[in-house]
Amino acid sequence: MPARINFRSLMKIGPVQIGAYRDRHGRTKDAAVCTADRCGWSSDYSSSTAAQLAARSHRCRVN
């Protein structure tokens, strides 16, 4: 059974939501996830600055 991930420091930039979490090794990571329907884009980053930059530059390809 996979571990439950609890996000904190949630932020939204356009359709992209950013949240910080701890991975299974105890390190803090940041995830950026597009909330648009049928987009499916998401990525993990080691800093919140990188996640914010990705959120600002993300363009959905779904029409």
Image (cartoon, rainbow, N blue to C red):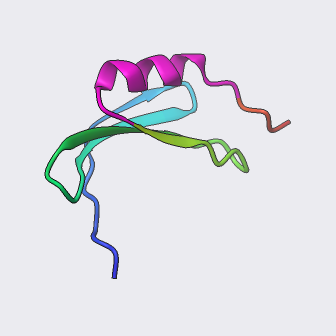
Residue 15 picture quarter? top right
Q: Quadrant location of the C terminus?
A: top right
Q: Does the magenta-highlighted stretch encompass residue 58?
A: yes
Residue 32 picture quarter? top left
Left/right of residue 48 with respect to residue 38 in the rendered view: left
Left/right of residue 35 with respect to residue 13 in the rendered view: right
Left/right of residue 39 with respect to residue 7 in the rendered view: right
Left/right of residue 59 with respect to residue 45 in the rendered view: right
The prevailing secondary structure element of the residues shown in magenta is helix
Identify the residue shown where x is 13% and y is 51%: 26
Identify the residue shown where x is 34% and y is 75%: 2
In the image, residue 51 lies at what x, y percent? 41, 26
The number of numbered badges drawn on the structure is 0
Residue ranking furthest to the front: 25
Name the foreground residue: 57 vs 38.
57
Span highlighted in magenta in the image: 45-59
Q: Is residue 26 above or below residue 43?
A: below
Q: Is residue 61 above or below residue 27?
A: above
Residue ranking furthest to the right: 63
In the image, residue 60 lies at what x, y percent? 72, 31
Q: Quadrant location of the N terminus?
A: bottom left
Residue ranking furthest to the left: 26
Identify the residue shown where x is 79% and y is 33%: 61
Q: Does the magenta-highlighted stretch encompass residue 54?
A: yes
In the image, residue 18 lies at what x, y percent? 39, 35
